[in-house]
Amino acid sequence: MLEYFLTPDLNIFLFLNGLHSSWADVFFYWVSNRFIWLPFYALLAFFLIRKWRKKSIPIFIALALCIFLTDQSCNLIKHSVQRPRPSHEPGLCEQVHLVAKPDGTLYRGGPYSFPSSHAANAMAMALFVIFYLSEKRKWVVASMLLWVLLLSYSRIYLGVHYPSDLMAGWIIGACWATLLWRIVLLIQNSKSKTQK
């Protein structure tokens, strides 16, 4: 029964991972690097501060807590489930397209894949930005979801995650983001009621 679900996951992974080229190797290696996105994060922070001013402080605190909880949840599940990454799976890793790092060694990631922390953290951050910046700005929703998909696909391209790893990460990130957003709303609403 489990194989019924795992076979499409593996087939989709092999198809998407097989769509490779020399330029895409470089591109997706850097897309997957968290530090390359620092200017993007700074731009998002700028827009949040510009819109929310002093109210942006609890938003940033909640976002930091959200990313921490999302990341730790993923690590806890990874070490409990212990599903090997495709790049570490015996009998499969020979079929997986792996990308060389700048030092020439192959990028393989850590030992476990389920769920994807990259996908979870990206979804959590994207939802926070959508919750706080998307009013009358449809481009915010589209651009943030496109970013999540691009970053998530890079993990398949690099051979370190199955599609189900990404979907599980999206769910975890979405749950934490929604929960912490609701908590911030409750705090803000209770403060505004006490000030009346």
Image (cartoon, helix red, strand yellow):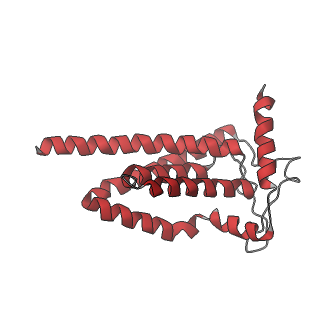
Q: Nearer the viewer, residue 46 or 103?
A: 46
99 relative to 138 in the view: left or right: right
Most distant residue in the top direction = 1
* Residue 2 drawn at (x, y percent): 77, 29
108 is higher (above) or lower (below) than 117: below
Q: Quadrant of the N terminus?
A: top right
Q: Quarter of the image for the C terminus: give it.
A: top left
Q: Where is residue 164 shown, x and y percent of the image? A: 68, 41
Residue 127 horizontal/vertical position (percent) = 46, 49
Q: Residue at x 64, y 62 (%)?
A: 32
Please state if 18 lies on the left or on the right of 80 as rendered.
right
Is residue 65 visible in the rendered image? The answer is no
Place of residue 55 in the rendered image (x, y in percent of width and height, measured from the top left): 27, 56
Quarter-wise, where is residue 49 in the image? bottom left
State left or right for residue 57 relative to residue 148.
left
Q: Residue placed at 80% from the left, 66% from the top?
A: 21
Residue drawn at point x = 25 percent, y = 46 percent: 188
Q: Residue furthest left?
A: 196
